[in-house]
Each structure stands twice: as structure tokens, then as C-alpha cells.
Amino acid sequence: MTSASPRLDLPMLQPSQAQKHVTHNEALLRLDGAVQMVLQSLSQSAPPETPAIGACYFTADAATGDWAPYPRMVAAYTASGWVYLQPAEGWLAWDASGGCCVVFQDDEWTDLPQQLQNLPYLGIGASADDTNRLTVSSDASLFNHAGGGHQIKVNKSATGQTASLLFQSNWSGRAEMGLCGDDALHLKVSDGGTWHDAVVIDPLTGHISGEAIQSSAIDVTSGRLMRADYGYCRGNAVGAVAMADGLPSGALIQRIDGTNSVALRFADGSQICSGHVTVSGAATAYGAVFGSDSVVFPFPAAFTQAPSISMSAQGVAGVWATNASAATATQANVMAMSAVSTADNIQINVIAVGRWI
């Protein structure tokens, strides 16, 4: 018959053994230390001066005093002195110094592993259910980095499904952000009854649309954001003007340079051409006044029809300018007039106002 139990090394009563109570009591003392074990320390070199009966310690590698012959063992103090237990793989104990449960594994006491894989539900301060399998009720939730950045991932199975963040007020949806029924990014808001797709970002182009965005070039709905292709800014105010279906489709203003002249075209269809030509004197008699030869002033950009012309002349005293013949959509025919005959050069300034479309 064996003299000790195989797992806890408890002494066993033998046939015809005298004083069986001694053996029995020793087994109980060993059980008292091993069962529901509380370790005051996970590594202590010397026994305490006044240990409490029932106190247990795990002796250090370099144990001293009464513990010197028993390194890396559980020393349990009893009314009869120290009882030493050799822990085996898988023993559990409460670490009084650390305030946690520990397990003896690979010849060391370590924190009890928390097996949290494939839990059906997890409720923190609240009750989880079949739909909300993870439920947290707290003032805040912190997702911190582990040395670098941090991502929160919300995955869906297919394009037509939803992966989003839903914000509620008293359990009623008020805002939603994410992939809502497709792969575009949606920002939606609600008054509790009607949902508005305020902003939608196309995953192919990165361009935006939605109820908060201008829907066309003539959309002036209050509160909507202007699209770059429907509005004007520093980048497209000046350039080539254009018109489509009666609405500006190009820049606000366009400059077209000619010879000693410039044309300014505007998005509303207006056009102004200005510049000058020079004539050599005014010596041809026209009754009591004298005139120059007729000179063509070509417009830098054509009008749709003959524009209104205004002119002035500068040079010698008493000169002015006039039409030599009717203007066309592409040019003005001008000449200088003078109160006296002169061979001096005269500059004729021309301003034409009309439409380019």
C-alpha cells in the first residue's frame, strides 16, 4: 500500500498503524494549506518573524532560515510549525499582494489566463442581447494605441449591406455615418422621422453629392454648399467665358488682346473692346473743317452685331474723332477731324460696347 496520495502528497494511514490520528491530522494540515490557497507572497526569501497560523508563502530560490532546504515551495504555517508543499502544474492560488488569481505554470506563478475567445455575449455595465452582442454602458470608451496608431474597423459582408456608426437620441436615430447600402460614404441626419442623405462621397471619384450640396448651377437653395464646377472662385473667375442654355458655363471674365487694343468678355454675354489707332494729320477739307483718311480699328474679338461706338482724339488742339462709315461686328471705320489743317499725328481712342453672344 502506498504511503502518500499521488497529487497532493498527503500521508495515508497504513494497516495496523499506531497513532493514526497523527497521520490523519498531518494530511488535514496539508489540505488546509493547498485547498483555497492564499499566498501572502509569490517570492519571499526569509520566513516572517511572527507568522500567522494558516499563512502561506512561496519561498524564493535563495531561501534562508527555516526555509533554506525548501526553495520554490509553498510554506504553510501551522500550530506545529511549517508545512512545505510542492506545487504542481495547474495549481491555483490567490495572490494577496497583487490582488489577483494566479496559476502555477512552467514552474512559475503567473496571472490566470483570461479566456475571452468566442464569447456569445459581453455586457459591460449593461446586458447584451442577440443583436447587440457587445454592450457597454459608461460615460466614455477609450481605444488607445499600442505604440503607434489605432484603427476602429467596421466590416460588412457585401456592397448592399451596411457598415456604419449610428448616433441616437433616446434610442431614436438622429445621425448615421458610413457605408449605407452601397460603397459610398454617407453622412445622414434625421429629425426622428425623416432621414436626409446630407453628404455622399463617390468611392470612384471622391466627388460629393447629397442634399447639403448644390445640385445644379442654378440651385441657390439656402444652406447648401457650392460645388466648384457650379460656382466661382480665384481659380476660375478669369479664363475663357462660355454660355450653355442661357447660363454661364465658363469663367466670369475673359481678356483678349489685340494690336493696341483689348477685349473684355463677361459671363453674361457683354463685351467691351477698347484701344486706339493713329492717323497722319487731318488736311482734307470738309467745308469749314478738315479730316484725316479713314482708318480701320479691328476689334480684338468679334461681336454678334455692330456695337455702340464712342471715340475721342488726342494730339493737336481742336481735334475730335468720328465714324468714317458704319461699324460692323468685327471692326470700326474711324477718322479724325480738326478745326484747322494739320499734318501732325492724331491718336483716335475707341470704345465699343456690345455682346459676344
Image: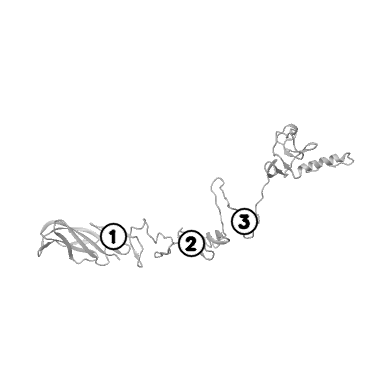
Image quadrant occupied by the N terminus: top right
SS class, disc 2: strand
**240 or 40: nearer the viewer:** 40
Badge 3: residue crowd in 10 Å (few <14, some 14–19, many ≥20): some
Q: Position of residue 290 (x, y in %)?
A: 11, 62
- For label 3, the residue is 135
Mark 3 touching mark 2, by CB under 8 A?
no
**Mark 1 is on which residue type?**
Leu
Badge 2: residue crowd in 10 Å (few <14, some 14–19, many ≥20): some
- For label 1, the residue is 264
Asked whether residue 3 is in view, the answer is: no
**324 or 330: nearer the viewer:** 324
Give the image quarter of residue 100: top right
Residue positioned 23% across, 65% down in the render: 308
SS class, disc 3: strand
Give the image quarter of residue 328: bottom left
Residue positioned 51% across, 61% down in the render: 188
**Mark 3 is on which residue type?**
Thr
Identify the mark nearer the N-term, 2 or 1: 2
Asked whether residue 38 is in view, the answer is: yes
Mark 3 touching mark 1, by CB under 8 A?
no
Q: CA distance from mark 3 to mark 2?
A: 29 Å
Q: Position of residue 321 (x, y in %)?
A: 17, 61
